[in-house]
Image: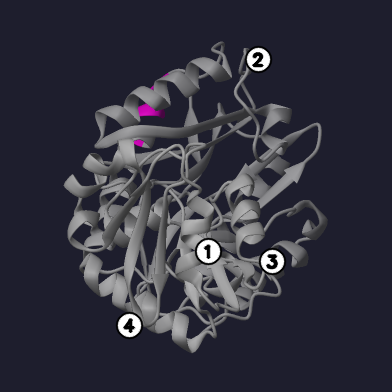
Amino acid sequence: MSASDRLARVRQALGTSGLDAMLVAPSPDLSYLVGYDPPPLERLTLLVVRPEADPVLVVPELERPLAEASPVGSLAEVRSWRDTDDPYRIVAGMLGGAHRAAVTDRAWASHALRIARAAPYAELVPVSEALPLLRAVKDESEIEALARAGRGADQAFEGIVGQTFAGRSEREIASDLSRLLGEHDHTQVGFTIVGSGPNGASPHHEPTDRTIQTGEPVVMDFGGRVEAGYCSDVTRTVFVGEPESEAAEVYEIVKKAQQAAVETVTPGITAEEIDRAARDVIEAAGYGERFIHRTGHGIGLEEHEPPYIVAGNRDQVVAGMAFSIEPGIYLEGRFGVRIEDIVVVTEDGVRRLNEAARAPTVVA
C-alpha cells in the first residue's frame, strides 16, 4: 500500500469515527503515513490530517529542507515556523471549529497540552483510543519485512544454543544474542532479555552478571529491527543440562498453551478468545495464577502495538494482522518458562513467522 493510499484510508477513517483531525507527532505513525522519521524534539513537528482538506506538515524552519526532501514533501504541504512564531496557534488555526481530534500516543505531553490550550474548543483523544487499529492490518510488503525479521531471530536462536551456557553470565549470553541478531539481517537490536533460574520468573528481567548454573531453565526474549524498520520478537526457554521434573512439566504446559492459542487464530475470532485458549490450558494444569500477563501484542514498526491479545478485547482479528502469542508460567524465586512466536492472520487461518525449535532444548 502506498503512502498516499494510507493517507486516504486515514482521512476516510476520521470521517467515519467522528473525528475532525488527526495530529501526528514524530513516531512510527508519522513514518508509516508519510515516510518521514524526524526525532521528537522540543520544537513542534506535527502532521495535521483532516477528512476534507489536504494534509499539512508543520515543521521548524530549520527542519524544512529535510522534510521537503523526504517523501512527505510530495504528500503534504510543508508549512514551516520560526523560533519567534507560535506553532500551536498555527495548528489551532488549521483545526478551526474542530470538536474532536486524535493525537498520536508518542506526542510529547508538553506539545499536546499547548495545542489544547491554543484550541480549547477541540477535545483531544489518543489515537490508540480513537483509531486503535490504524496500523494493525499489514500489507504484503510489511508481512515480508516481519517474516525476514522473524527468520533472522530464529537464526540467532540457532546460533546461541550451540554455545555453552553453564558458568557464563546472563550478560554474556545477551551480548552474544545481540551480535547474532546483527549477523542475521538485523540493523538494530531492540532488547535481549536473559533470565536464568529464579530470574526467569521476572518476565522483563534485565540481564545481570549472575552465573548460569547447570540444571536451570533460561528464558531468552530478544528482538530488533530489519532495514525496513519492522520488528522481531521471539522467546525461547532452554535447559542447561537435563531439566528437573517440574520444570519439564511446566515447559510442556506452556508449549501446549501456546499451540492451543495458535490453532485458535482465524479471521473473525476475537482477541480475547485467543487469550482464553492459552489461559484455559494453564488454568487446567493448576498454574493460572502464575500466568501474569496478556497472551500477546501486535507488532510492526513497534515491538508492542495493537491488537492486544488480552481478556476484554473484543476486537475481531482479520487477515493481515500480526501479533505475538507468548503464554508463560512464572514461579517466583524458582524459575519461569515462556514460549513466543509472531503469527500473521491469513484468509483462512494463521501463519507462524517463527520456526525456531519449540521442543525442549538442552544446552551445555
* Amino acid beneath label 4: Glu
Which quadrant of the rendered structure holds the N terminus? Answer: bottom left
Q: Read off the residue under disc 1.
A: 92
Please give the range of residues in magenta: 158-163
Q: Nearer the viewer, mark 4 or mark 1?
A: 1
Relative depth, front residue between 254 and 170: 170
Q: Read off the residue under disc 3.
A: 279
Q: Is residue 353 visible?
A: no
Q: Read off the residue under disc 2.
A: 210
Category of crowding for the residue at label 4, using alpha-carbon neighbours closer than 10 angstroms: few (below 14), some (14–19), many (at least 20): few
Answer with mark 3 or mark 4, whichever residue precedes in sequence: 3
Q: Residue at x 32, y 35 (%)?
A: 62
Q: Nearer the viewer, mark 2 or mark 1?
A: 1
Residue at the extreme front: 84
Find numbered disc 1 in the image and state the secondary structure of the residue it sits on.
helix
Residue 347: which numbered mark, if any? Answer: 4
Q: Nearer the viewer, mark 2 or mark 4?
A: 4
What's the distance in space between the residues labelled 2 and 4, CA to CA?
46 Å
* Amino acid beneath label 3: Arg
- Relative to 43, is 52 on the left or the right? left
Residue 128 point in image, percent of width and height:
57, 66
The quadrant in which residue 334 appears is top right
* Amino acid beneath label 2: Arg
The quadrant in which residue 288 appears is bottom right
Answer with mark 4 or mark 1, whichever residue precedes in sequence: 1
Answer with mark 2 or mark 4, whichever residue precedes in sequence: 2
Residue 113 point in image, percent of width and height:
65, 53
Category of crowding for the residue at label 3, using alpha-carbon neighbours closer than 10 angstroms: few (below 14), some (14–19), many (at least 20): many
What's the distance in space between the residues labelled 2 and 1, CA to CA?
54 Å
Q: Residue at x 44, y 56 (%)?
A: 299
Find numbered disc 4 in the image and state the secondary structure of the residue it sits on.
loop
Q: Are marks 2 and 3 in contact (CB under 8 Å)?
A: no
